[in-house]
Image (cartoon, rainbow, N blue to C red):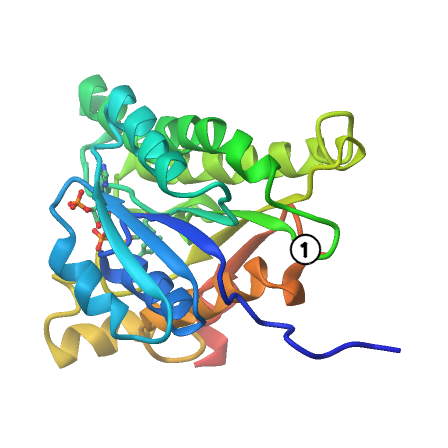
Amino acid sequence: MMNFNDMFDVTGKVVLITGGAGGIGRGIAGAFVAGGARVYIASRSDLTEDAEELSKYGVGECIGLQADLARDEDIISLTKQIKERENKLHVLVNNAAIANLIHQFEDFPIDDFDTLIRVNLRAPFALIKECLPLMSQTGTAEAHASVINIVSVDGIRIAGDNDWAYGLSKAGLAHLTRQLAGREGAKHGRNSGRHITYNAIAPGPFPGMLDRLLETEEGRKAVGAATVSGRVGRPEDIGAACIYLASRAGSYVTGVVLPIDGGLLVGTKANS
Ligand SMILES: NC(=O)c1ccc[n+]([C@@H]2O[C@H](COP(=O)([O-])OP(=O)(O)OC[C@H]3O[C@@H](n4cnc5c(N)ncnc54)[C@H](OP(=O)(O)O)[C@@H]3O)[C@@H](O)[C@H]2O)c1
């Protein structure tokens, strides 16, 4: 008999979200707290107040940790702090990123390239590696563990804004997602008793990095007009997708890059 009970249940899950107090991160953290999860958010800032605020979203709780993901030692100490408090990690969301290092390709400073790749691609690679032992002991055939990488539509389309390293970093992270997902069926994964799914979400226009463009009603309308939905995304749109991927509802989904973009990638002028 089919079982539709608790399909989207994330009660009691332990979740780590990098950049969890940012525009999109807040939507992800809020969704898991609302669903009853224990959520760790981490970034360079002191997130104590943000965590208190996010804890009000539901029966779960939110705890703020501090880490600069550009620093290897911070990635190790962040994972150590989780391991000291938890013996399981059900969900890792690599959400923190930087953008807006904009130069003509011919003038692009290689140091800017390194800075961006370090945070957007190297850090998720290292954090997944550090968290794997904890996640390996967590996922079961009935309740998988889940790595969710937040990428971007700009890692799928060719954006025209001279942010040369950003799209590249996101395309790289999407590829890492597929590589890791594919490996799970082999000797390191399911056959060794490990149950982890790896998926990526590619947001279209959302609050956060685009805040300056979205300050005015005019700006929001202009940005939203590029989508089929005709609006800018809401942080909870990404939160809901993460709940799907991390709960039993998403247990048969791995290795996908899911655009949550209001149809930005498929929209044509002819539709409008
Ligand atoms: N908003 C959009 O339109 C959009 C579109 C496509 C994809 N995305 C993706 O969605 C994700 C979230 O973006 P957002 O729009 O919510 O941006 P945001 O509001 O700027 O949030 C980014 C978060 O990353 C953290 N962060 C940056 N550098 C860090 C570092 N070195 N170490 C630790 N944390 C760091 C920031 O916190 P601290 O400053 O405290 O470190 C911040 O919380 C990103 O992966 C982004 O690429 C966003």
In the picture, which quadrant includes the C terminus? bottom left
Confirm if mark 1 falls within 8 A of ligand 1. no
Residue shown at the point (25%, 67%) measured from the top left: 54
The vertical placement of 168 against 109, above or below, is below
Which residue has dot 1 on it?
Answer: 253
Q: Where is residue 259 in the image (x, y as percent from the top left)?
A: 50, 59
Q: Position of residue 62 (x, y in %)?
A: 29, 60
The vertical placement of 6 against 20, above or below, is below
Amino acid under disc 1 = Val
Residue shown at the point (64%, 46%) measured from the top left: 139
- Determine whether the residue tagged by mark 1 lies in a helix, strand or loop: loop
Q: Where is residue 242 in the image (x, y as percent from the top left)?
A: 49, 61
Q: Residue 210's quadrant in the figure?
A: bottom left
**Number of marks in picture:** 1
Depth check, front residue: 5 or 164: 5
Residue shown at the point (80%, 33%) measured from the top left: 191
Q: Position of residue 57 (x, y in %)?
A: 30, 75
Residue 214 vs residue 6: left or right? Answer: left
Residue shown at the point (63%, 75%) measured from the top left: 6
Depth check, front residue: 208 or 61: 61
Binning the other alpha carbons within 10 Å of mark 1 as few (below 14), some (14 to 19) or many (20 upward) gives some
Depth check, front residue: 87 or 154: 87
The vertical placement of 3 against 131, above or below, is below
In the picture, which quadrant includes the N terminus? bottom right
Depth check, front residue: 184 or 48: 48
- Judged from this view, the residue extending furthest toward the right is 1
Q: Residue 248's quadrant in the figure?
A: bottom right
Q: Residue 239's quadrant in the figure?
A: bottom left
